[in-house]
Image (cartoon, rainbow, N blue to C red):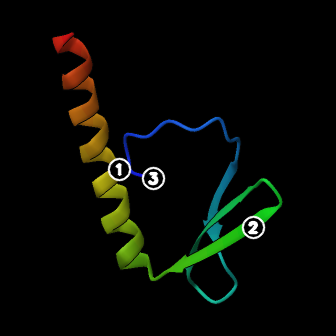
Amino acid sequence: MGINDERDIEANLQIGPTELGMVRLFIAGGGIEIPMDFEPDEAEEIADEIRAAAQTARRMKTRR
């Protein structure tokens, strides 16, 4: 499965700080729970990557 493969799967995403000063992405769906913890600097890098992907997606959408 790649980034461009569509699937009919629902999942919930929660994002928040943990008691240990980490940033947690918590994904739950289909009977699976995936907690992913990141240092704050790593979380900011991920946020930057998400923003960059959103900007690229907007440009691709306007070309159609």
Q: Residue furthest bottom?
A: 20
Residue 36, given in percent of the width and then of the height, sits at 58, 75
Q: Residue, x 28% and y 31% (percent of image)?
A: 57
Q: Is residue 38 left or right of residue 50?
A: right
Foreground disc of the pair 1, 3: 3
Name which residue type carries label 1.
Ile
Locate residue 21: give its quadrant: bottom right
SS state under label 1? helix
Q: Earlier in the sequence, mark 1 or mark 2?
A: 2
Residue 41, given in percent of the width and then of the height, sits at 35, 77
Q: Which residue is mark 3?
A: 1
Q: Residue furthest front?
A: 1
Question: In the rendered structure, are the residues bearing label 1 and label 2 in contact, judged by CB atoms less than 8 Å apart?
Answer: no
Q: Earlier in the sequence, mark 2 or mark 3?
A: 3
SS state under label 2? strand
Q: Which residue is mark 2?
A: 33
Residue 54, given in percent of the width and then of the height, sits at 31, 37
Q: Residue, x 70% and y 47% (percent of image)?
A: 11
Question: In the rendered structure, are the residues bearing label 2 and label 3 in contact, judged by CB atoms less than 8 Å apart?
Answer: no
Name which residue type carries label 2.
Glu
- Mark 3 is surrounded, within 10 Å at the Cα level, by few (under 14), some (14 to 19) or many (20 or more) other residues, namely few
Q: Which residue is mark 1?
A: 50
Circle on res. 12: none
Q: In whole angstroms, how far apart are the C-alphas of marks 1 and 3?
A: 20 Å
Q: Is residue 25 left or right of residue 9?
A: left
Q: Residue, x 21% and y 23% (percent of image)?
A: 60
Name which residue type carries label 3.
Met
Foreground disc of the pair 2, 3: 3
Can you say whether 8 is above or below 25 in the image? above
Question: In the rendered structure, are the residues bearing label 1 and label 3 in contact, judged by CB atoms less than 8 Å apart?
Answer: no
